[in-house]
Image: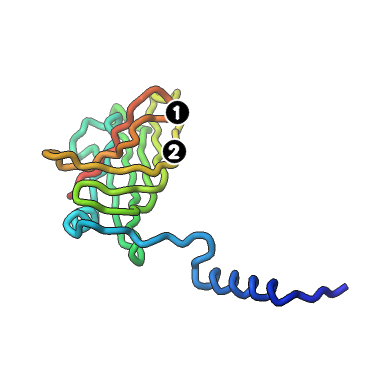
Amino acid sequence: MRRRLGRRAITGLLLAFALATAGLAGSAVAATKVDSQTAKTKLLGPLWLSLQWIGDGSFNAMGKAQVEDRDGTLHLSGRQDGTCDSAGDWLEIDGDILAVGLRTFHFKGWVETRVSYINNGNPCRREVEADFLMKTGKKYWRLQAIDNPCDVAADYVDLFPR
């Protein structure tokens, strides 16, 4: 049995097809709102990434992160792997920067950590929408959502310009 589609159904299908082929179906991300070009310039490119539980705090123990401009949307991704005493531990981050201010930026994405003595050594992944803030006198941005939802711990996820 053949069924005829009405005008509304055809219009809806054409609109869905147009959005899908334009890469806009359900996944469109608004361009990053930039209030400070200086801060944006500082963010773009390679950064150092650090979780206080991993390594000794030196730049040699830090991970690497990257902020890149994807058609007007800034995207942050990075990873830190533990060495020596923290071997097997890691931090990974991935998401979009929604807004950039002079000393802050708003991030939406996920953060995943694995520290041997936190959460029984199991990975902890969390969806995050929060600010990174560079306090006066500091040379790094710190994620303000510090509570680890998998254990009683405060995670200091820091990004340092290179």
Looking at the rendering, which quadrant does residue 32 occupy? Answer: bottom left
Q: Which mark is residue 138?
A: none
**Mark 2 touching mark 1, by CB under 8 A?**
yes
Q: Is residue 106 above or below residue 153?
A: below
Say which residue appears at 39% left-offset and 35% top-offset. 113
Say which residue appears at 11% left-offset and 39% top-offset. 137
Residue situated in front as seen by the camera: 155 or 88:
155
Q: Position of residue 146 (x, y in %)?
A: 33, 32
Element on which disc 2 rests: strand
Q: Earlier in the sequence, mark 2 or mark 1?
A: 2
Q: Is residue 140 above or below residue 4?
A: above
Amino acid carrying label 1: it is Cys
- Locate the N terminus and report the quarter of the image it occupies: bottom right
Residue receiving disc 1: 150
Element on which disc 1 rests: loop
Residue 151 left/right relative to 84: right
Say which residue appears at 19% left-offset and 60% top-offset. 37
Residue 104 left/right relative to 98: left
